[in-house]
């Protein structure tokens, strides 16, 4: 299949716990957002909580999603920016300090490289590696909150950086699966950060906002303040756990439980009649009625757990009930009716559903919170292609696996 101009084609690939999604964007010069020309989705059983547990199954799912995106777009897909997810992901904030190198004390990109290398000189276990590094702000001779110190004069240069790390075995398994599907990895991005890339505005990031990406097996949290990432984390619980709870509580299989969840479960019941009897056509036999309270008792417990864990992450970041921009919900779990109201109630913050907007093309497929992360990965693929490498802005020389580290190219 002949590809169109590769300079204009950008691809995001999200290998999630329940599905694989591939997004193809075609960008024309002078246009802010690319046109969505291909979307491929395939279920997967080879992932669990964001980690590969069956390489063969995962490769098959990736291939199926990519094939569908190729058929729709007419593009031969052999490269992509991919999402990284899973409870193995950890993040931390670090500082680096150096003396400015030049005799005239003018700060150069080489100084930025050195100070960022100093920030990444952290002790990591041998089975962990750095995935992404985000310089948040610089300090020049005591002058704080400098965004770009190049060209300034000073003796002492400091940086505050947000560093995302992951377990090397989990990352290698994901990379192996993607390579075996015939895809070259052009970049790796933490999934909640990719979702934020697709749905947040600059104003929201300046005010202070959190993205909560509720996937099938995990929930990602990314907190922004003053335009930069403040904290990020991945919780090992997601919407798929609600399905499992329903399967156990209703004594049925997972497929039927998923249908029941999508059709009957609400995250926030409001003033609904809790004694109302609901007929579950998905269940066999005559005794297939349950009350709304029974459904809510099963699903509600898991939803409360998810938001309690999210609130703990906000507390760690020092932002519990302190985000003027509130929270933006993405991922398949954000499609559950009433979830905004539940988030407001349990987090004490304004809440909204985040969907990719401003695109042309197959917009009906992506105007959905479940597509925030894969669309964000495609946008990141485009951003990195448009950003020419600048000497001294890469930190790859300080770690063993250069391709695992990427700069913050988000707006």
Image (cartoon, rainbow, N blue to C red):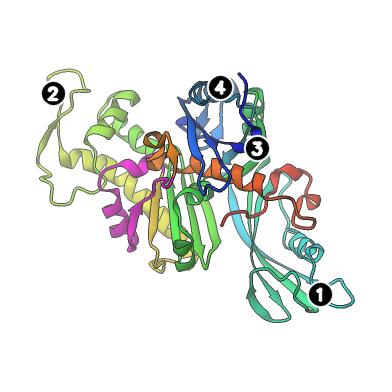
Residue 150 is situated, as x and y percent measured from the top left of the image, at 74, 69
Give the mark, 1 or 2, whose residue is nearer the N terminus: 1
Cα distance in 3D space between marks 4 and 2? 42 Å
Image quarter of residue 117 = bottom right
Q: In the rendered structure, does residue 346 fall within the stretch colored magenta?
A: yes
Q: Identify the residue position indicated by label 2 in the image.
A: 287
Q: Are marks 1 and 2 in contact (CB under 8 Å)?
A: no
Above or below, comparing residue 138 to residue 328 in the picture:
below
Cα distance in 3D space between marks 3 and 1? 36 Å
Does residue 85 appear in the picture of this structure? no
Q: Are marks 3 and 4 in contact (CB under 8 Å)?
A: no
Residue 304 is situated, as x and y percent measured from the top left of the image, at 32, 50
Cα distance in 3D space between marks 2 and 3? 59 Å
Q: Residue at x 57, y 25 (%)?
A: 75
Which class describes the residues within 10 Å of circle 1: few (<14), some (14-19), or many (20+)?
Answer: some
| Magenta highlight range | 331-358
Residue 382 is situated, as x and y percent measured from the top left of the image, at 60, 43
Q: In what element is the residue under mark 3? A: helix
Left or right of 277? Residue 178 is right
Which is in the foreground here, disc 2 or disc 3? 3
Q: Residue at x 41, y 69 (%)?
A: 322
Q: Residue at x 53, y 64 (%)?
A: 227
Residue placed most toward the observer, 318 or 127 = 318
Tag count: 4
Q: Identify the residue position indicated by label 1 in the image.
A: 106
Q: In what element is the residue under mark 1? A: loop
Which is in the foreground here, disc 3 or disc 4? 3
């Amino acid at each position: 299949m002949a590809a169109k101009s590769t300079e204009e084609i950008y691809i995001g690939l999200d290998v999630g716990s329940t599905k694989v999604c591939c997004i193809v964007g075609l960008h024309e010069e002078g246009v802010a957002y690319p046109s969505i020309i291909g979307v491929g989705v395939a279920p997967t059983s080879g992932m669990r909580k964001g980690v590969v547990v069956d390489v063969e199954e995962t490769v098959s799912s990736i291939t199926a999603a990519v094939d569908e995106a190729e058929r729709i777009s007419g593009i031969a897909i052999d490269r992509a920016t991919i999402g990284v997810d899973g409870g193995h992901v950890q993040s931390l904030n670090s500082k680096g300090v150096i003396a400015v190198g030049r005799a005239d004390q003018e700060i150069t990109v080489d100084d930025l490289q050195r100070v960022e290398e100093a920030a990444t000189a952290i002790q990591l276990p041998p089975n962990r590696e750095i995935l992404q590094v985000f310089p948040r702000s610089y300090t020049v001779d005591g002058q704080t909150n400098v965004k770009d110190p190049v060209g300034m004069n000073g003796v002492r240069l400091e940086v505050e950086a947000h560093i995302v790390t992951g377990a090397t075995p989990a990352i290698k398994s994901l990379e192996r699966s993607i390579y075996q599907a015939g895809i070259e990895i052009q970049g790796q991005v933490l999934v909640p950060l990719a979702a934020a890339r697709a749905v947040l505005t600059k104003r929201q990031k300046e005010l202070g906002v959190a993205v909560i990406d509720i996937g099938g097996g995990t929930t990602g949290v990314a907190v922004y303040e003053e335009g930069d990432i403040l904290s990020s984390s991945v919780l090992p619980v997601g919407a798929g756990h609600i399905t499992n709870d329903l399967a156990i509580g209703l004594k049925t299989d997972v497929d039927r439980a998923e249908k029941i969840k999508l059709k009957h479960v609400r995250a926030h019941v409001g003033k609904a009649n809790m004694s109302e009897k609901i007929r579950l056509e998905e269940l066999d036999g005559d005794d297939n009625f349950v009350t709304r309270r029974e459904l809510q008792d099963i699903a509600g417990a898991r939803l409360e757990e998810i938001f309690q864990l999210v609130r703990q992450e906000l507390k760690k970041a020092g932002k519990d009930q302190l985000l003027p921009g509130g929270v933006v919900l993405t991922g398949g779990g954000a499609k559950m009716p009433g979830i905004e109201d539940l988030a407001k109630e349990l987090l004490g913050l304004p809440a909204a559903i985040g969907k990719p907007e401003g695109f042309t093309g197959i917009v009906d497929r992506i105007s959905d919170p479940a597509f925030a992360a894969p669309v964000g990965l495609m946008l990141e693929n485009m951003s990195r292609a448009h950003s020419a490498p600048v000497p001294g802005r890469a930190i790859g020389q300080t770690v063993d696996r250069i391709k695992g580290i990427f700069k913050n190219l988000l707006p």
